[in-house]
Amino acid sequence: MDRIVVTGGNRLEGRVAVAGAKNSVLPMIAAALLTDDQVNLFDIPPLDDVFTIGEVLQRLGADVRLHQPGTVTIRAGDLESCEAPYDLVRKMRASALVMGPLLARLGRAKLPLPGGCAIGSRPIDLHIKGLRALGAIIEAGHGFFEARAGRLRGNRLYLDYPSVGATENLLMAATLAEGVTVIENAAEEPEVADLAALLRKMGARILGAGTKVIRVEGVERLGGASHRAIPDRIEAGTYMVAAAITGGDVYVANAMAEHLDPVIAKLTECGALVIEDAGGVRVVGPDRPRATNVKTLPYPGFPTDMQPQFMALLTLADGSSVITETVFENRFMHVPEFERMGAEIIADGRTAIVKGVPRLSGAPVRATDLRAGAALVLAGLAAEGETDVWGVHHLDRGYVNIEGKLRSLGAKVARVEDRLLARRSS
Ligand code: UD1
């Protein structure tokens, strides 16, 4: 029951470094199932989501070791199971990424049906449809998908929507399929290209990852490899908004500007000064942000994972902004929490109108998901008085030491463990 207590009003200044990208690392760990050789991954952030996928692999029988600083070694020699455990898949939906590799390597996979989550129904129908087109027989029953296949066969796959997870699952499955697979309308996210870079080092033949059409020529086997994950563009974007919302001046080291184009464009429209160089991005915040409209889209559009943080910024803008969420059906759960802090927002379906107010007031609020939690911390940095952000476990899924990094920039942020509650429940 930890919470983060933010005392607002400090202008952030200094340098902060972002970690390896969580959303690259999760599929990369799953990709290690494709070989019985050792896979070494570097710049691995010590996040709860990373531990969860590591545990999924361990339960399948892989040897997963986390070494300091940030190195993971995985050897999926003899796998004992082909079932992704329900308790872990419920906790983190990206666990579904083991399905493609398991099918390709073992010809069997068992995965719990996805169920609901905080930001919408999040089905995996596109993963299933694609795997079936590669020759898998997949049946649903008793809350699980059960899949089996001989050697998968390459095919032409068209994704009805450029789903990141479906693209990654199918890409991994196709590496060991017989013949050529073409994934059309594929997700173009940098994390897909990063996964493909690892797979190529393992011996896969892939062209076009990071574009809408990916071509994979299947090989008989993949081997071990070593790879360093790209920097996390969402963590970088979050600190860039932290600079903007406090009128600060922050250099975000490791931020790759080419992965952050829409975020940089929108920060500039809000009046921030953004200076890019080879080592990172510097953001100098405006006295007061200007209103602007934001529409989330698949990459290279504006990332849905930055939508709550931008809403935090726009609550304080001079004027009204329209935020349209097109990626997830239910990603405005943070709106009532911002309202508790004095924000004026009208949300209807996938659209929110944010009428900027001159100031927010600190309040107790609850993080409903990972990025909503980050957004509430950002709002707290700019609010008057104290903001208690509950539900910190969400933040630990995706941010390495967020309170320490913000403190190093001059913010007043502390993590408080609710010992009384901990004692009562023990
Ligand atoms: C990934 C990211 C997540 C990010 C999201 C969108 C990881 C581990 N997570 O999630 O942080 O918010 O991309 O950028 O990389 N959909 C279907 N059927 C499917 C698959 C997806 O309808 O089979 C829908 C989803 O419900 C959602 C949309 O497609 O509305 C996008 O989902 P997707 O791109 O698959 O996101 P994830 O891979 O789950």
Image (cartoon, rainbow, N blue to C red):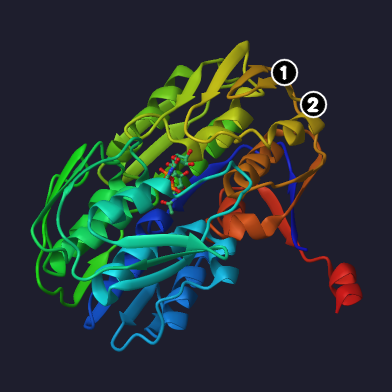
Q: Residue furthest top?
A: 319
Q: Helix or strand or loop: what does disc 1 sit on?
A: loop
As drawn, 275 above or below 354? below
Determine if residue 408 is in view: yes
Q: How many marks can you see?
A: 2
Q: Which residue is mark 1?
A: 357
* Residue 247 visible within the image: no
Q: Splitting the image into four quadrants, where does ligand 1 fall?
A: top left
Q: Determine which residue is flagged by label 2.
A: 342
Using residue 36 as the reference point, say whether residue 267 is left or right of it. right
Say which of 147 and 300 sits in front.
147
Horizontally, is 425 left or right of 281 in the view? right
In percent of width and height, residue 143 lies at 56, 63
Identify which residue, 304 or 263, lies in the foreground. Answer: 304
Q: Amino acid at mark 2?
A: Gly
Pointer 2 and pointer 1: residues touching (CB < 8 Å)? yes
Residue displayed at 33% across by 44% down: 280
Q: Residues within 10 Å of mark 2 (few under 14, many from 20)?
A: some
Q: Position of residue 383 (x, y in %)?
A: 74, 34
Viewer-proximal residue, 45 or 413? Answer: 45
Residue 380 appears in which quarter of the rendering? top right
CA–CA distance in space, label 2 to label 1: 8 Å
- Residue 194: image x %, image y %? 25, 54
SS at badge 2: loop
Residue sitting at 77 percent across and 29 percent down? 339
Which residue is nearer to you in this view: 404 or 363?
Answer: 363
Estimate the x, y position of residue 171 in percent, counting from the top left.
24, 55
Q: Residue at x 39, y 24 (%)?
A: 265
